[in-house]
Amino acid sequence: MGLNVVKYADLVSRMARDIPNFDYQDTLEALRDAGREFCNTSEAWYENLTAINIVADQQSYALSTDYPAHFKRVKSVHILSSTDVTNGAEGRLMDSSYYKLVLPATLKFKVNHTPSTAVTGGLVVEVVFAPNMNSTELPAWFMSRWGDGIIGKAMYELLKLQDVNKAGLFLNQYHAKLSEAMVETMDDITPYVGSSDVQVQEYTP
């Protein structure tokens, strides 16, 4: 079964009517840049990878995904017993100090915290994704949730030298969605320096 994604190209028609001197390729590039910025700043794109088989006393595990994206960081790691797997239980959440992400795509446990019992499907890793530079799509669930923010940023970049007032409205749209996304992931996001709250830049024409 293929990935359930939405391509940036599918959004272009929604934007064309608001862009003077519309250029398809420029619009597509603006969407790609906006998507990468939104994902990297908010860290709102995170998912569990397919469960990995635990090999007794194996310290390192390769991580993989079919998305055109790379792993920004590991959000959580759960170790499941055979009983957990059978019962569909969540398993044991590992302390983040017990492992690290070795770029580009290896999870490495510290020696004293390496799983010692083999379990089929016993390693569940939740990762934060960031789109690759040449990415042309994002997951459908993510685009449904945050696509308006990505469009807002792309429109701002395309309009800022043509219509500052309209560009400002789209920038506000971007920051509103970005703020919302960051609040949802605040427990794993380092706040901006000097503040414990998400700071939203507001444009005033």
Image (cartoon, rainbow, N blue to C red):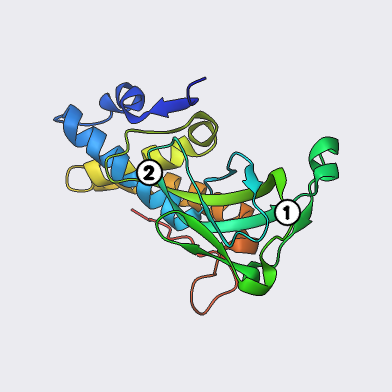
Q: Mark 2 to mark 1: distance in Å?
A: 32 Å
Indicate whether 15 appears above or below 176.
above
Q: Which residue is mark 1?
A: 79
Q: Which residue corresponds to the image point at 48% horizontal and 22% vertical from the top-left? A: 2
Residue 153 appears in the picture as rendered: no
**What residue sits right under mark 2 in the picture?**
35
Q: Earlier in the sequence, mark 2 or mark 1?
A: 2
Dot 2: what SS? Answer: helix
Q: Is residue 105 above or below residue 66?
A: below
User: Residue 76: x and y, percent?
Assistant: 64, 57
The residue shown at (25%, 33%) is: 28
Which image quarter: residue 68? Answer: top left
Q: Nearer the viewer, mark 2 or mark 1?
A: 1
Could you tell me which secondary element the residue under label 1 belongs to? strand
Q: Position of residue 106 (x, y in %)?
A: 48, 56
Q: Amino acid at mark 1?
A: Ile
